[in-house]
Image: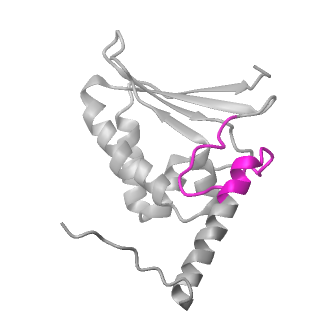
Amino acid sequence: MPTLEPNLNLKSKPTKMKLNSLLLFLSVLLFNACNPKAPDTAVVGNSKETMRAKKDETVWVVTNKVKAESKLAFESFMKDVFLNALQTSTKDSTKLLYSKTRYLTPKKQNRDSSWTYVFIMDPWVEGGNYSELDLLKEKYPLAKAMEYDSLYTSYMKEQPTLTQLIQTEH
């Protein structure tokens, strides 16, 4: 099997530019990793590393009880429609909300046969638009977004519950 030798001509302009870009990227990465006071609004890709509320910040917990017969359809909807819209949004405000939101799936079925799915906004972003319909309208035409919003609602066994909490020092 032939061995591959790296072809690095450090004096060529394209290689120097790539190397400089890589060094800049690594410098920014190192700075952010070593700087505990980096701004919370910095979102790199879909990183969830800055999503822990600090003391006295608000955290929202949204609990959705999904009908037993809707479990597979709901999970497919969340993956293919809702979370896809969140992950592919080009709006900085939506990227920020996504970076601060966790989505949890059930480990087992509830006694009443429903399934509990939870969103945790940690921290909740003051002034953030958490509307499912508005998110869907970012990606889909209005009629399709409204259809998806109705579909989302149809999977629910009951109205979602919203719990607002304050982060303690612990």
Magenta stretch encompasses residue 130: no
Residue 121 occupies quadrant: top right
Q: Which residues are magenta?
A: 29-52
Residue at x 70%, y 25% (from the top left corner): 165
| Residue 29 screen position, x and y as percent | 65, 57
Residue 134 occupies quadrant: bottom right
Q: Quadrant of the C terminus?
A: top right
Residue 169 occupies quadrant: top right
Q: Quadrant of the N terminus?
A: bottom left
Name the residue at the top extreme. Answer: 111
| Residue 168 screen position, x and y as percent | 78, 22
Is residue 133 positioned above or below 124 on the image? below
| Residue 8 screen position, x and y as percent | 46, 80
Which one is in front, 23 or 167? 23
Left or right of residue 55, residue 41 in this image: left
Magenta residues, dominant SS class: loop
Is residue 5 positioned above or below 146 on the image? below
Residue 136 makes an appearance in the image: no
Residue at x 69%, y 37% (from the top left corner): 123
Left or right of residue 73, residue 116 in this image: right
Which one is in front, 110 or 134? 110
Colour scheme of the rendered structure: one colour
Left or right of residue 42, residue 102 in this image: left
| Residue 75 screen position, x and y as percent | 32, 38
Is residue 121 positioned above or below 168 on the image? below
Residue at x 66%, y 43% (from the top left corner): 50
